[in-house]
Amino acid sequence: MDIVGYLTRLVKNAPSGRPLIDRDCVPCRAGTPPLKASAVAGFLKELDGWSLNPAGHLERHYRFPDFASALAFVDRVGALAESVDHHPELRLSWGRVAVELWTHRADGVTETDLVFAAKTERLYAAAPPPREVP
């Protein structure tokens, strides 16, 4: 993306009270600082089930009725990651998926991680409902 396109996307995503789900994932540039924990905490109100883990990364654990449903969700998250060039850490097990987000270049959480988390929530909403897993 050229500099004009990059700046256009930044302006489009400028803090405006728009919900995270309505924003675009904007790749960060070298030197982009991570958000402060207090700023992240404000956005977490929009992200049901997400929290900051001890490493300071966004994290959410999802539950599914079986392995195939969890794997299908991982595939959908992977397709999203490729489409926006932002790649989470995904951990898959029977009926469970953990998604961990942070921006390597910033060495912490950026707005792009929060936007990606919101888009992941949308994908989960389209998934089968969870059930109790022993």
Image: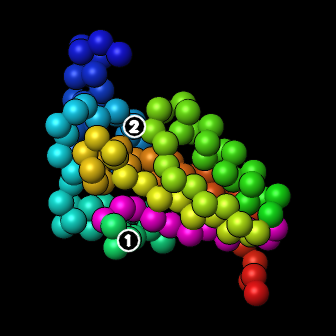
- Pinpoint residue 78: horizontal percent, then vertical percent: 61, 42
Which corner quadrant of the image does residue 27 belong to?
top left
Q: Residue furthest bottom?
A: 134
Q: Amino acid at mark 1?
A: Asn
- Pinpoint residue 123: horizontal percent, then vertical percent: 62, 51
Residue occupying image coordinates x 34% and y 73%: 54
Which corner quadrant of the image does residue 43 belong to?
bottom left
Residue occupying image coordinates x 27% and y 68%: 41
Residue occupying image coordinates x 49% and y 42%: 87
Which corner quadrant of the image does residue 92 belong to?
bottom right
Badge 2 marks a residue whose secondary structure is loop
Disc marking residue 25 = 2
* Quadrant of the frame with the C terminus: bottom right
Circle nearer the viewer, 1 or 2: 1
Callout 1 environment at 10 Å: few (<14), some (14 to 19), or many (20+)? few
> Viewer-proximal residue, 94 or 112?
94
Q: Is residue 121 visible?
A: no
Magenta region, residue range: 56-66
Q: Amino acid at mark 2?
A: Cys
Between discs 1 and 2, the one toward the N terminus? 2
| In this picture, residue 89 sits left or right of residue 105 | right
| In this picture, residue 101 sits left or right of residue 42 | right
| Alpha-carbon span between mark 1 and mark 2 | 21 Å
> Viewer-proximal residue, 115 or 103?
103
State whether residue 85 is above or below residue 100. above
| In this picture, residue 116 sits left or right of residue 12 | right
> Viewer-proximal residue, 63 or 14?
63
- Membership of 34 in magenta stretch: no
Badge 1 marks a residue whose secondary structure is loop
User: Which residue position holds label 1?
Assistant: 53
Q: Is residue 4 visible?
A: yes
